Image: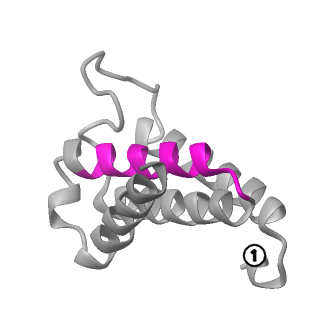
Amino acid sequence: RLEEWDLSAQSLDLYRDALEMCYESADNPDGGAATRDEHEVWLPASAPPATVEFILRLHIRIAKCHAHLGEQEQCATTFEDAYKIMTTSPKAAKLNQELVLPIISGLCSIAIQRN
């Protein structure tokens, strides 16, 4: 992790690139033509659980990079996106609970800072 060496901006770029690749693979898991149901806002139901988990992990890392850079609104938005994925994806219910805690604590921390 580059942010351990105080390189959060570089980490952010790397995590965003990885996130983009994850979304592309979630949209197109079998390598065929990409399809998307207009009602699937965050991830298609066909997204493999490992991809959903990795997307959530990337959202957490991206939010933490934004926080480290002092970009509180982007941090909040990223945690909110992760929460929406977590609550709307049918595969997210089976995910490890270690992903839930950082997302919820990040949202709570932001809510406290806003008040």
> Is residue 77 positioned above or below 13 on the image?
above
In the rendered structure, does residue 82 fall within the stretch colored magenta? yes
Q: Which coloring applies here?
A: one colour
Frontmost residue, 30 versus 10: 10
What residue is shown at x 81% (from left), y 59% (from top)? Answer: 9
**Magenta residue span:** 70-86
In the rendered structure, does residue 13 fall within the stretch colored magenta? no
Q: Which residue is mark 1?
A: 3
Q: Position of residue 50 (x, y in %)?
A: 36, 64
* Residue 19 visible within the image: yes
What residue is shown at x 28% (from left), y 68% (from top)? Answer: 100
Left or right of 41, for residue 75: right
What residue is shown at x 50% (from left), y 56% (from top)? Answer: 59
Q: SS class of the residue under badge 1? A: helix
- Which amino acid is tagged 1? Glu
Q: Position of residue 102 (x, y in %)?
A: 38, 71
* Quadrant in which residue 109 is drawn: bottom left
* Residue 29 visible within the image: no
